[in-house]
Image (cartoon, rainbow, N blue to C red):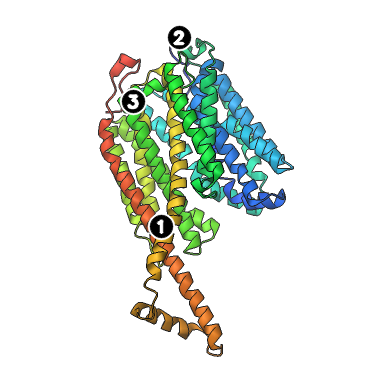
Amino acid sequence: MNPQTVPQTNKWLVALAVILPTFIEVMDTSVVNVSLPHIQGSLSAGVDEVTWVLTSYLVSNAIIIPITGWLSSVFGRKRYLIFSVSLFTLSSLACGAAPTLPILVVARIFQGLGGGGLQPLSQAILLEAFPVAEHGMAMAVFGMGVVFAPILGPVIGGWITDNWNWRWVFYINLPVGALAIFLAILLIHDPHYIRRARFHIDKWGLFLIAVGLGCLQIVLDKGQREDWFDSHLIVVLSLIAVISLIAFIIVELRAEHPVVNLRVFLDRTFAAGNVIMFMGFFCLFGGIVMLPLYAQTLMGYTALWAGLLLGPGGVASLVIMPIAGILMKKGVSARLLLGIGLSIMAYSLWLMSGFNLQADFFSIAWPRIVQGLGMGLFFVPLSASTYVNIPREEMGNASGIFNLLRNLGGSFGVAFSATLLVQRAQLHQTFLVENVTPFSPQLRDYVNRLLEALPGHMGAFADSSRLLAAIYREVLRQANMLAFNDIFWLFAWFTAVLVPLTFLMRPPKGDAAGRAPGGVH
């Protein structure tokens, strides 16, 4: 066996071994959301207290993702993978059995620490298990896990909570984790260069990235609830995050053995790919959060039916991702597919900007299906082409950075859309109220229709109070509808602007970086 290669194992079995735990871990970022009211009642917690079940997981997850490459080099990729899955599985058991909220939050912190490394580990292992010409197919497999899992999470979480108990949201991880540990022991092998890695601790780098990303994630998760910079807590955490992350960049660029090697950004293709990924998921997750919110608050959908609106788009992504991988294997330009994918995603968001209060289920689901098709053509070629000039020795480090920016893009997008929704709704309400006058023919027509619907035996005061309440509710609905339209329209333009950035991504350099050219052109 060539010492520079990994022992030959069936690539599809390797894919199964790493995607199983990754799928469950990514799904856990959203599966608990719908269970929060049940957890709150069961553990006698307040609304603000119970949200730490989500925040604690996201914070620990964000901290561990970028240092996964360093941890793999120190402990060995296989050993660290098995440890991560084991910690995630045991923490899931502790979450399900938690008798109090503090114990549940602590268990979620350990669950996030265990699960955070699974995304970059899986991506790095898949890129080595598949030949370079099949990296598109490898990223299709990876994308089917990380893209579909957060969409499926709320649906599964809601069904389990309604039919069993919120504790089973965590217990379902146990058999999957046990199977993943068995497959990892059997199938995963360390590359030669990882076995030779030396032990170095970049103490300041570890400290600064933990503090910076931890504070940043708390700000993004709780900013809207705390009214952003009107909150002393948010201001302090934001300052700590900014100072820590700037200091982290300075320290890492000067360190001989950095915990995160930021010099990979000197490769233009890798840098452009990370910018596109960050902004792509910024728009994707911002829109995904708005879609069920629109359906529930304005259209009267239940949580289950709102979740089902996202399902067809997820299925479309599952269908198109393998096709994108096959097209890349046959030599179709990754940049071409990426440009088409971004264009389709922008078009789908533009369709969503035309939603109204009379839309039926299919009218809402169709743009989501279009978005799912674009997502498949976006994620697969971008994930494959971003790494084309990265040496194998830096693959774990680069994968950690890439996955961190993908997750942060989603977090920023959710925070941005939630804040913009409130601001734009208030603005539209101000303009709409100006037209609510006795001289408006539209208002007179609306009032006449309402009066016809009111019972004739009620007194004038009752009629007028109900009438004013109905008018006010309609103004709020229209204002919120216009706010949703504004957000989707803005995300459409943000996505369209990314298309020219695809031309910054260079084709592979060949064997110069120790990697043969393949299906990325």
Position of residue 330 relative to residue 185, above or below, is below
Q: Could you tell which of marks 1 and 2 lies nearer the N-terminus?
A: 2
| Dot in front, 1 or 2 | 1
> Residue 203 got which mark?
none
* Mark 2 surroundings within 10 Å by alpha-carbon count, few (fewer than 14), some (14 through 19), many (20 or more): few
Circles 1 and 2: CB distance less than 8 Å?
A: no
Give me the residue at 63% from left, 44% from top: 169
Q: Which residue is mark 2?
A: 3
Residue at image location 51% in from the left, 50% down from the top: 227
Where does label 1 land, which residue? 424
Give whichever of 481, 296 is nearer the camera.
481
Q: Dot 3 surroundings within 10 Å: few (below 14), some, or many (20 or more)? A: many
Task: Please tell me the numbered disc located at residue 133.
Answer: 3
Alpha carbon distance from label 3 to label 2: 22 Å
- The residues tagged by marks 1 and 2 sit, at their Cα atoms, a distance apart of 60 Å
Position of residue 482 measured from the top left corner of the image (x, y, whole percent) = 38, 61
Viewer-nearest residue: 520 or 207 = 207
Question: Is the N terminus in the top left, top right, bottom left or bottom right quadrant?
Answer: top left
Q: For this rendering, which residue is in front, 197 or 424?
A: 424
Quadrant, the C terminus: top left
Q: Secondary structure at mark 1?
A: helix
Amino acid of disc 3: Ala
Question: Residue 260, percent across and down?
Answer: 46, 22
Q: In the figure, 429 relative to 437: above or below?
A: above
The amino acid type found where label 2 is placed reads: Pro
Which percent across, then down, holds residue 57?
A: 58, 37
Q: Is residue 506 visible?
A: yes
Q: Quadrant of residue 76?
A: top right
* Secondary element at image label 3: helix
Which of the two marks, 3 or 1, is nearer to us in this view?
1
Kind of residue sitting beneath label 1? Arg
